[in-house]
Image: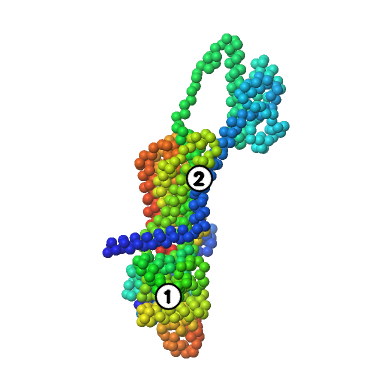
Amino acid sequence: MNRIRVLRAMAQWTAVFLKEATDAWRDRRTLRMVLLLSVVQGPLVLLLVSTLASEKENRIDKREIYIQGMQHAPGLQNFIERQAYAIKVPPVDALDKLAAGQLEDAVIVVPSDFEQQLQTLQMPSIEIFANSSSRGSSTARDVARKLLQAYVQERVALTLALRGVAVASLKPLDVQEHDMANANARSAQLTGTLIPLYVLIAVLTGAMGAAMDSTAGERERSSLEPLMMNPVSPWALALGKWAAVAALTALIALLTSLSFIPAQLLIRSDALQALFRFDLADAVHFGLICLPFAGAVSALLMATSVRGKSIKEAQAGNSLVLLVFMILPLVSLLNDAAEPDWYYLVPSLAQQTLMLHVLRAEPIALWQWLLPCAIGLVLTVVGLAYVGRAMRSNAVR
Amino acid sequence: MILIDHVAKRFAAPVAGLGWQRKGWRIARAPQTWVQAVSDISVHAPNGQITGLLGANGAGKTSTLRMLAGLLVPDSGRLEVDGISVTQERNKAQSRMGILADARGLYPRLTARENMVYFGRLQGMSNLAALARAEQLADLLDLRPLLDRATDGFSQGERVKTALARALVHDPDNIILDEPTNGLDVLATRALRETLQFLCSPEGGSKCIVFSTHIMQEVERLCDQVVVVARGRNVASGTVAQLLAQTGQTEFEDAFVQLAFAADAEVPA
């Protein structure tokens, strides 16, 4: 008897799944948009990040510097030209433009008595004007500062050398920096926050439409009432609907992850291109990490939608779920130290942390993957139990 | 055979505003008010007969049929389908009923055939059996040209026919129809009437048919027996001829108005 009941529930589950999958497949406009976004999002993020990085590279490679009053400092001019920098005269209203953010650069201002004060060791002042709210201006300021510091060092070294002081006494220490981060980890500084976050956003937004259509959509179309007049098991109904939503969400997660492979061709920064390596194995890892999350998110979004009498009502509840899951990964931004173990207990934060491990080519312990899977499973079961019960009690509008 | 025995149902009325009210200097939750949708309705519908549930808007017809369909749990009373209690063995009872709900609720992106097969599968039919039954119903209800069209662009009549076919896909012994002729033109109404008459005949399977309506003509032409309800209660029952004799009227509409409004005057608000 129990076997017959189980077989019947499985047949119903299959029927619900096939119907929901067909329904989602026929909603071509929505499906096209969701899948297009999932494929396009990755390349767009990388293009954005690499454009920012390449702008910085170009600024450094340009080797141009604005100096006002260069004629008052022939020694400095000689030094800067020896460093292969082109000296440019700033516009007349350069400082106003800087303040208004219209000049993406920095300006060195040399006073008229600079050389005279320098010769008589009166410690002349030299000013650098920049706008810290502008990324380009900040980069140019750093370049100007480094040039001036190098000039000061050279002056001091020459002066002391003329007086017979060993140059080594000026530099008693030879500081050598070693960056222990591997190439992947260095590239992950730029891409590590954005890429996992965009994969998570793709999963969340992709699941939302399908979750709402299969629950609140039934009520909006008035099809839930006739549906619940059938002897259908609440679990078969909830599982069938969930399987269709979760399958679509998992597909979106996989497509988004795969889209980063061809997206590497769009990277405009040479440094980033040399560092960022994302291959098929990484995409599969991303997919495996996102799979339990896709399931849990589908169930939770269905649970928040099921009481909505319309898609509009369901959207209000879902916005909250989306907001929470999008904010949680940002917790890791506030923490520079190694991530604590509790990160793996928090959905979306756990997935972001694991994806970061993949991008940094760091090993993932089995428990680090299993724990978020278990949390996802619990959330899925709780969500589906609620959906199954609520569908019957909400059948009548 | 369908038995509805002294059922009652009340609903919590939606609270206006935010659900809070001022009581002197303090704000308190507004008290819950209730709407008695069904006070005491009884219907006994035997096989091979069409039983009409006749009442004005808000008389409690749809709530009664929703209780019968297992969507609402009655506050009191008994509901049975072929001797099976709807409240205790809902799934078993549901598999013996084919219900055309007031909300037709077709899936717009599925074809008429797919709508039928989906409900057939939920009723426990195999895919092949559901497909074969869809073909039969297409002939019975003149649905063949619509079978493979998405229901999105269907006319009202086409929707009703498809929803009826979907309700009949598992060949139930009991058919419940809530306002089936709403929005149908003369020809579609006539076709539906003929279908129902066939279904309750011995050739059509001697089905037990219960349908709710507020249209007198349908009742006169179709029903073997009529249960008149007003304000959630039975006010009269019998054949059309018996009800005419009971009220001393020659027009059934006059008889209904007399029965329903006399009940209104008697029942305290």
Is residue A228 visible in this depiction of the protein?
no
The quadrant of the picture occupied by the N terminus of chain A is bottom left
Residue B139's image quarter? Answer: bottom left
Q: Residue furthest right?
A: A92
Image height check: is A103 above or below A317? above
User: Which chain is home to disc 2?
Assistant: A
Image height check: is A26 above or below A138? below
User: Crowdedness of circle 1 by 10 Å Cα count: few (<14), some, many (20+)?
Assistant: few
Of A241 and A305, nearer the camera is A241
Tell me the element at label 2: helix
Colour pattern of the rendering: rainbow
Residue A290 lies, in percent from the top left, at 42, 47
Q: Mark on residue B139?
A: 1
Is residue A91 visible in this depiction of the protein?
yes
Is A330 left, or right, of B198 in this rendering?
right
Q: Which residue shows up at 48% across the image and 67% down it?
A: B149
Residue B144 lies, in percent from the top left, at 45, 72
Is B198 left, or right, of A3 in this rendering?
right
Residue B48 lies, in percent from the top left, at 37, 81
Q: Which residue is mark 2?
A: A42
What's the amino acid at mark 1?
Asp
Marks 1 and 2 sit apart, C-alpha to C-alpha, by 53 Å
Badge count? 2
Q: Mark on residue A360?
A: none
Q: Which residue shows up at 48% across the image and 76% down it?
A: B181
What's the amino acid at mark 2?
Gly
Q: Are marks 1 and 2 in contact (CB under 8 Å)?
A: no
